[in-house]
Image: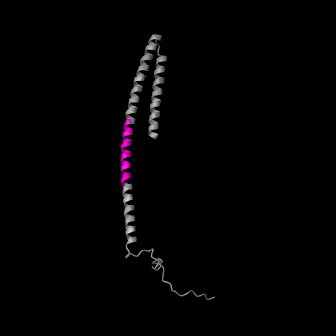
Amino acid sequence: MEKNTNSRDFVLGALIGSIAGAVTALILAPKSGGEFRQDLNLQAGKLKDRSYEWKDQAVMKSSEMAALAKEKSAVISKNVQDQSSGVVEKVKSFRSKENSQEQDPTLVTAKDPSLPTVHPVDPLTPPTSSEPLSTNR
């Protein structure tokens, strides 16, 4: 975005500079009134032609940029769509596996209240005795 702003500022500066230079050259040139008006019209015509060229270049560049943006957005959209479809399929398969486990009576799940509660133990923790601690004071 900053590059576009810098380019636009440069083009605007070049346009203003060329106008100022042309006007200064015409005013300071030692010519008669008729010659001055003729040169002024000639310079105005050149400036008009140059501005049409710049406009055409800007239209062409903006069309190229729009086509490129459209192409890239289509690629990104396709990637997002593919990835979201993959996620949906994974969720569906996970749900179907979960449902099949709930329907199969031979599988015992952690939701079964008859299973004993198991607390994980750190393997580096030394074994402890089941006797209560004695307090000798």
Q: Is residue 104 left or right of residue 111?
A: left
Secondary structure, magenta segment, majority class: helix
Which range of residues does the magenta coloring cover? 63-82
Residue 95 horizontal side relative to residue 132, left or right: left
- Identify which residue is drawn at 39% across, 32% down: 59
What residue is drawn where x is 48% and y is 27%? 16
The residue depicted at 36 percent of the width and 59 percent of the height is 89
**Residue 60 against residue 19 in the figure, above or below:** below
Q: Is residue 32 visible?
A: no
Q: Is residue 31 left or right of residue 64?
A: right
Q: Is residue 48 magenta?
A: no
Quarter of image, res 135: bottom right
Counting from the top left corner in percent of width and height, residue 111 is at 45, 74
Q: Quadrant of residue 15?
A: top left
Q: Is residue 77 magenta?
A: yes
The N terminus, quarter of image: top left
Tell me if I can see residue 134 in this picture.
yes
Taking the spot 44% from the left edge, 35% from the top edge, the residue there is: 7
User: How many numbered dots are placed on residues in this image?
Assistant: 0
**Colour scheme of the picture:** one colour
Q: Nearer the viewer, residue 47 or 35?
A: 47
Q: Is residue 13 above or below residue 36?
A: below
Viewer-proximal residue, 127 or 25? 127
Q: Nearer the viewer, residue 66 or 81?
A: 81
**Looking at the picture, how far across and down is residue 80, in whole percent?**
38, 52
Position of the C terminus, as image quadrant, is: bottom right
In percent of width and height, residue 23 lies at 48, 20
Compared to residue 128, the image places residue 93 above or below, namely: above
- Identity of the residue furthest to the right in this view: 137
